[in-house]
Image (cartoon, rainbow, N blue to C red):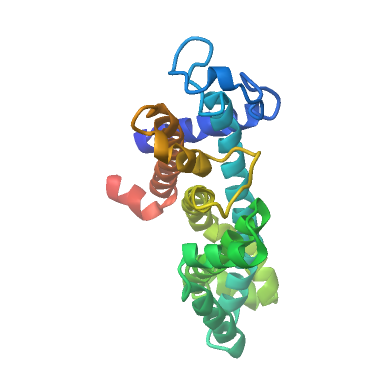
């Protein structure tokens, strides 16, 4: 079994399970302020220490990871639900006006860098988790539309697709029954990449105050709050930073491992 895939799966599973655990249990109440215990160093009762308001760092990281993963997952679902059908339609109507309309619409969205688009939407409609999801979800749509179209176009020239057409199947039926299953490997790999990117976007928006709002913890806002205290309380920045790195690294390794496992060309090269 490939080391990259195993390591990525272990890291991803660890943080996802940690986030799910926070739904039912955390070491301490992440909203509880305890000023006498503020800025405690890691160890003892508080394994990762406390912040400037006496809140338990581990509890906040658990809930913050849940928030980041939830935002990225919903935005990913939006991209898949809208992007994949658009990509299939564009490939089905290659060269036609509908194909051109879909792809030029994708180009318009790609004209705006992701963070600029996210900041624009959250600045106009207000900072919140919902607006962060909408911003990244909109960006995901053309990503998956292009991946789907790119994977589907060569398939339309294959013999088994031509045989299905001769058998009288409609282009919609062929797209769902034959094309979609054959591009799933591309979508799975791209999904892990976009999932990791969503974690980073949520952290970046929260860092500048445009993402998840208090009292809900966010890994990005924990880093922002720690800026002025890094000199005498470095654990405030180290542990949330390591959590972000761990989640993103795990998902990227998982994506690389899945790409190697699902790409038949790479499998042939190794044999």
**Residue 66 x %, y %:** 61, 37
Please give left or right for residue 180 compared with residue 159 in the image: right
User: Could you tell me if residue 179 is visible in this image?
Assistant: no
- Quadrant of the frame with the N terminus: top left
52 or 171: which is nearer to us? 52
**Residue 270 x %, y %:** 29, 45
Q: Residue at x 40, y 52 (%)?
A: 264
Q: How many marks?
A: 0
In the displayed image of the protein, which residue is found farthest to the bottom?
97
In the displayed image of the protein, which residue is found farthest to the top?
44
Q: Residue at x 48, y 9 (%)?
A: 44
Asked if residue 79 is positioned above or below residue 221 in the image, the reply reads below
210 or 248: which is nearer to us? 210
**Residue 208 x %, y %:** 50, 53
Asked if residue 90 is positioned above or below residue 81 in the image, the reply reads below
The image quarter containing residue 178 is bottom right
Q: Residue at x 60, y 37 (%)?
A: 217
**Residue 166 x %, y %:** 63, 77
Q: Residue at x 64, y 61 (%)?
A: 134
- Quadrant of the frame with the C terminus: top left
Asked if residue 104 is positioned above or below residue 23 in the image, the reply reads below
266 or 255: which is nearer to us? 255
User: Could you tell me if residue 230 is visible in this image?
Assistant: yes
In the displayed image of the protein, which residue is found farthest to the front?
36
């Amino acid at each position: 079994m490939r080391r990259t895939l195993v390591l990525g799966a272990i890291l991803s599973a660890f943080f996802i399970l940690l986030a799910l655990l926070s739904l039912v249990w955390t070491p301490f109440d992440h909203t509880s302020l305890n000023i006498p215990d503020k800025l405690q160093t890691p160890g003892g009762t508080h394994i990762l220490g406390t912040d400037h308001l006496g809140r338990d760092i581990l509890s906040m990281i658990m809930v913050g990871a849940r928030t980041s993963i939830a935002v990225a997952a919903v935005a990913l679902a939006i991209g898949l639900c809208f992007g994949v059908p658009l990509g299939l339609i564009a490939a089905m109507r290659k060269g036609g006006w509908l194909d051109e309309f879909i792809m030029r619409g994708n180009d318009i969205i790609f004209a705006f860098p992701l963070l600029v688009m996210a900041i624009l939407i959250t600045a106009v409609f207000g900072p919140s988790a919902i607006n962060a999801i909408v911003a990244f979800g909109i960006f995901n749509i053309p990503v998956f539309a292009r991946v789907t179209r790119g994977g589907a176009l060569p398939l339309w020239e294959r013999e088994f697709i031509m045989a299905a057409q001769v058998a009288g199947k409609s282009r919609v039926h062929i797209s769902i029954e034959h094309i979609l299953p054959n591009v799933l490997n591309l979508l799975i790999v791209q999904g892990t990449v976009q999932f990791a990117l969503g974690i980073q976007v949520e952290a970046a928006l929260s860092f500048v105050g445009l993402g998840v709002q208090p009292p809900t913890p966010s890994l990005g806002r924990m880093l922002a709050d720690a800026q002025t205290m890094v000199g005498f309380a470095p654990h405030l920045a180290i542990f949330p930073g390591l959590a972000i790195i761990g989640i993103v690294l795990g998902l990227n390794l998982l994506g690389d491992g899945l790409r190697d496992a699902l790409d038949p060309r790479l499998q042939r090269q190794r044999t």
